[in-house]
């Protein structure tokens, strides 16, 4: 995952796949344009080799550039300026439709990246929600996308460990530059980062998360290689990884925490208001102002509360909506699970129930396999349920991760059905898999994305529950409404934190007043918005646009409207800004 600001243009869920040296089979009639896009894609992998690893391209598995250094930043500026200049030389109107889409996406991406450099995102190199220190844990555990199948694979990771030490030193330097310029994180977030670092500090290398690959050494390795690699990993853990994590943890606790912000939003930081307008543009792929987004959020919260009142009446609850929220959070019958397996099995049952109706809504479905897994222990405390993309070549399935710190506290009414539709099927798994399996797209389209399209699609999929044959239990439907209002609340609190001076506590209270969420969950959510300004806006803005388009075409086309064709067309050309997808879908409807 790239850094705050610039990296938010590409999503975590789009850590996907490509085959080494795979050829683009685009229908483009402009070979010069295709070359620009292909050259950019190859250069982007060298700039971000972890992205290449995530995409199944193993050519750069030993590389880990110091992407928060000034030298690297200057280099990337040159790259983006160079490709913006190259693509701008083409006459858009002379391109075929598919290339117009690619042109629009690419040009906007270069412009957005270049605009973001002025905000000095490298001064906050990571936070509690994402960043290289956490990504290293996922890669180095042996359970992520970093392969550990050959001797070279094991040696590649050792080289990345050595490079991470340099990155960690730079992170401390950059945090200090942030202190000097007033670009710092809130104290409440720093407090969460310190144990994340300390948890990876061990006194015995065999107990380290990073020892995982040694526990799974392939049987066909020679005894000499097994011994050599085991010794090398022990040395790397105790000599490089542990000191790096300890240095970052000690720095955060002793030096950074006392200098961290007491305010919750970025509005108090230098260029903070301008930064938030930029982030809203990046994350929604629209020109909506923060105030417009805030007003939309208030209206949606009021509308969904009305639906919640109906459910309360349906189940015969006599108290207020706030008392109903409390009932949903505290009633023992809503906590039926005894162990993680029961929770995972319950999610599996949802898939079984919706499968018969999926064919009515989609004629094109992904080939990529799908699994449901429990989130790894080292990151479950701060993790949300999430989707990690699989590989188009079938070597790695798409994975729906569910954090289950304590199964007995997993609430049945928390929106399990809507969560599955969003993170798994037909949400992220369908959208990401179909995109990366589509070899007619340029690679930068296949393996990139925007939050508004991807998260908008996933949230829109939550609204399909009744059509898919679920939400028959009123409490599960209440959970779905809880998920929907949660995204509407995000529009209110995200804008309010960063532009209206709301405190962390005010935002937590607003969230808990308007949805059945436990305080621990509300705290984690609000702190996420504090760490990643604007990202939470993308879900509801994207979903509202998709629903708006569907409604428009249902009225426009009447009996000619096919929901399956609408969904297929929406997903066909992959992720793109909302303005671009609207033009594409209008053209589709016109042809009907």
Image (cartoon, helix red, strand yellow):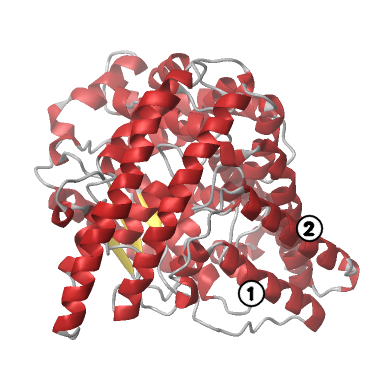
Q: Is residue 16 left or right of residue 328?
A: right
| The quarter of the displayed image where residue 478 is located | top left
Q: Nearer the viewer, mark 1 or mark 2?
A: 2
- Residue 171, percent from left and from top: 49, 42
The secondary element bearing badge 1 is classed as loop
Numbered mark located on residue 449 in the image: none
- Residue 111, percent from left and from top: 76, 52
| The quarter of the displayed image where residue 58 is located | bottom left
- Whether residue 519 can be seen here: yes
- For the point 17% across and 82% down, the residue is 224
Numbered mark located on residue 81 in the image: 2
Q: Is residue 280 left or right of residue 149?
A: right
- For the point 67% across and 32% down, the residue is 275
Contact, mark 1 vs mark 2 (Cβ under 8 Å): no
- Name the residue nearer the viewer: 382 or 469: 382
Residue at which label 1 appears: 441
Sort mark 1 into few (<14), some (14-19) or many (20+) by Cα contacts within 10 Å. many
- Residue 250, percent from left and from top: 34, 32
Number of numbered discs present? 2
Residue 340, compared with residue 261, is above or below; it is: below
Question: Which quadrant is home to the C terminus?
Answer: bottom right
- For the point 48% across and 20% down, the residue is 259
- First in sequence, mark 1 or 2: give its number: 2
Q: Is residue 530 left or right of residue 551?
A: left
The secondary element bearing badge 2 is classed as helix
Residue 387, compared with residue 573, is above or below; it is: above
């Amino acid at each position: 995952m790239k850094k705050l600001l610039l990296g938010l243009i590409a999503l975590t869920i789009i850590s996907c796949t490509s085959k080494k040296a795979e050829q683009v089979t685009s229908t483009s009639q402009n070979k010069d344009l295709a070359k620009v896009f292909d050259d950019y894609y190859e250069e982007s992998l060298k700039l971000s080799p972890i992205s290449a690893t995530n995409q199944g391209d193993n050519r750069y598995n030993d590389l880990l550039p110091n992407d928060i250094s000034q030298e690297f930043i200057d280099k990337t500026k040159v790259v983006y300026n160079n490709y913006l200049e190259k693509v701008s030389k083409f006459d858009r109107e002379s391109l075929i439709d598919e290339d117009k889409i690619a042109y629009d996406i690419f040009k906007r991406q270069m412009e957005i990246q270049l605009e973001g450099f002025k905000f000095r995102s490298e001064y906050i190199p990571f936070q509690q929600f994402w960043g290289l220190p956490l990504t290293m844990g996922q890669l180095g555990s042996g359970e992520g996308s970093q392969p550990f199948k050959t001797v070279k694979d094991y040696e590649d990771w050792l080289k990345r460990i050595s490079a991470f030490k340099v990155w960690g030193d730079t992170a401390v330097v950059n945090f200090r530059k942030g202190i000097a310029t007033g670009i710092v994180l809130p104290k409440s977030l720093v407090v969460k980062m310190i144990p994340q670092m300390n948890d990876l500090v061990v006194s015995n290398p065999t107990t380290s998360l990073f020892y995982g690959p040694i526990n799974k050494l392939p049987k066909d390795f020679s005894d000499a290689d097994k011994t050599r690699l085991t010794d090398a990993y022990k040395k790397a853990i105790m000599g490089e990884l542990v000191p790096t994590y300890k240095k970052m943890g000690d720095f955060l606790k002793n030096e950074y925490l006392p200098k961290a912000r007491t305010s919750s939003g970025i509005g108090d930081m230098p260029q903070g208001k301008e930064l938030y307008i930029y982030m809203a543009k990046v994350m929604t792929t629209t020109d909506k102002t923060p105030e417009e987004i805030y007003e939309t959020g208030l209206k949606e919260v009021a509308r969904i509360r009305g639906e919640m009142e109906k459910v309360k009446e349906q189940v015969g609850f006599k108290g207020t909506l706030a008392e109903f929220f409390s009932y949903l959070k505290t009633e023992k019958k809503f906590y039926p699970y005894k162990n993680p397996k029961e929770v995972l099995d319950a999610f599996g049952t949802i898939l079984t129930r919706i499968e018969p109706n999926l064919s009515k809504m989609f004629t094109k479905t992904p080939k990529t396999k799908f699994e449901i897994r429990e989130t790894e222990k080292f990151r479950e405390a701060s993790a949300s349920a999430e989707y990690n993309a699989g590989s188009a070549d079938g070597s790695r399935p798409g994975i729906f991760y569910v954090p289950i710190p304590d199964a007995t506290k997993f609430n049945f009414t928390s929106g399990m059905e809507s969560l599955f539709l969003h993170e798994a099927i037909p949400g992220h798994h369908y959208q990401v898999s179909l995109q990366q399996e589509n070899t007619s797209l340029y690679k930068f389209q296949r393996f990139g994305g925007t939050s508004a399209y991807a998260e908008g699609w996933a949230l829109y999929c939550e609204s399909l529950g009744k059509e898919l044959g679920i939400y028959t239990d009123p409490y599960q439907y209440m959970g779905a409404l809880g998920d929907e209002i949660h995204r509407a609340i995000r529009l209110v609190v995200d804008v309010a934190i960063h532009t209206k001076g709301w405190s962390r506590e005010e935002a937590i209270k607003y969230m808990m007043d308007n949805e059945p969420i436990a305080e621990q969950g509300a705290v984690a959510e609000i702190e996420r918005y504090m760490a990643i300004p604007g990202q939470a806006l993308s879900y509801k803005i994207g979903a509202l646009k998709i629903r708006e388009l569907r409604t428009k075409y249902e009225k426009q086309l009447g009996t000619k409207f096919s929901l399956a064709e609408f969904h297929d067309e929406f997903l066909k050309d992959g992720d793109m800004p909302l303005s671009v997808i609207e033009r594409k879908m209008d053209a589709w409807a016109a042809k009907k």
